[in-house]
Amino acid sequence: MLFSLQRKLIISFLTLVVLLIIYLIPVNTNYMETSKYLEVEKNNVYLFNNDLLVLTEVISNKENILDKILEIIDTLTINGSKKDYISSEYKATIPSNTKVLDIDLTNKLLKINFSKEFSSANEDTIESIVYSLTELEEVEEIMIFIEGVKLDKINDKLLPNTLNRDFGINKVYEFTSINNVYKGTMYYYVNINDKYNLVPVTLFTNDNINKIEVIVEKLKSSPIYQSNLMSFLSDNAKLLDYEIEESKIRLEFDNPLLDNFFEDELLEEVKYAISETLKNTIGVSEITFIINNDEI
């Protein structure tokens, strides 16, 4: 009887000790703080995947804007210190051993002075730098220097005085006449390891790419020579009407944007591809989608 009572007291005491230890150790708080940090701190960069510059995310640990800029440039540099953070499916674009000698950011104009190794850069390198760094809201235009001398030409092609997204990316030339050539950046997706990554494609075409109807039709099919790209926009989606008011646009369709054989989750990808295309091509900032009189 006495032994049984002692045994119960010992078990009760040990249970109390375990509960006290669990209560005192702040495991969940640390985990939540770490998870929150990891979710927030990421850089959007454009890296190569099968000859296309593709948007992907790389973890960042910088908060100061100039440090963040240097971190992005490091990510874009072949064999840079961030290479272990990049999946093997992606390739950097800035020549190996390139150093940043100086940077200056004033009124959203970023000036970058590279070392002489940058001399072997090509047009794709410029595109990846411009599109990656202008993902930052603090950067709108860029000027590039090599050892203090402004870069005015790349691969015998003259560069504008300042570089911005008008320079284009993943350029595709569809025009058959040199007259009335229009330029616009369309947004598609590419499947990389069962994950859809955004791919901007600058089209040069004889179709008036500034017309909403033309943009919608272009998104229904992949750009020429790039059959692996997709927007998921259904061929049956018909644009009935649209209305532009200041920086807002309202699009009205008579059929679903997504075909039935796609998962419903891809509807957001469809809307995002259309929205990014319209934002970059005609300059609107807010898009409303109407399907059969219902907003989606």
Image (tube, rainbow, N blue to C red):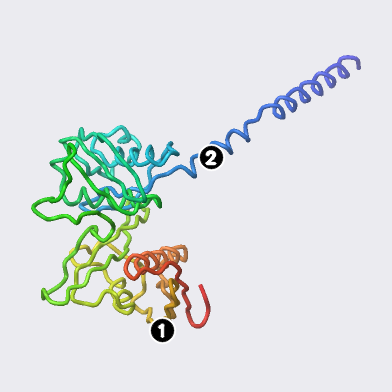
Residue 98's quadrant in the figure? top left
Query: Looking at the rendering, in which quadrant would you find the N terminus?
Result: top right
* Type of amino acid under label 1: Asp
- Judging depth in this view, the residue of 44 and 130 nearest the camera is 130
- Judging depth in this view, the residue of 12 and 46 nearest the camera is 46
Residue at the left extreme? 156
Dot 2 crowding, Cα within 10 Å, few <14, some 14–19, many 20+ = few
Eye-nearest disc, 2 or 1: 1
Classify mark 1: helix, strand or loop: strand
Residue at the front extreme? 106
Sequence-first tag of 2 and 1: 2
Q: Residue 169, image x and y in percent?
A: 24, 58
Classify mark 2: helix, strand or loop: helix
Residue 160's quadrant in the figure? bottom left
Which residue is pictured at 31% across the width and 41% down the height? 104
Which residue is pictured at 19% across the width and 38% down the height? 148
Answer whether labels 2 and 1 touch (C-beta < 8 Å).
no
Say which mark, if any, is on residue 207: none
- Judging depth in this view, the residue of 197 and 10 nearest the camera is 197
In the picture of the structure, the residue carrying the numbered disc 1 is: 241
**Residue 225 placement, left or right of 35:** left
Residue at the right extreme? 1
- Judging depth in this view, the residue of 237 and 159 nearest the camera is 159
Say which mark, if any, is on residue 35: 2
* Type of amino acid under label 2: Ser
Which residue is pictured at 40% across the width and 42% down the height? 65
Residue 84's quadrant in the figure? top left
Q: Residue 209, image x and y in percent?
A: 26, 74
Vertical placement of residue 184 versus 237, above or below: above
Q: Residue 59, image x and y in percent?
A: 41, 40
Dot 1 crowding, Cα within 10 Å, few <14, some 14–19, many 20+ = few
What's the distance in space between the residues labelled 2 and 1, CA to CA?
44 Å
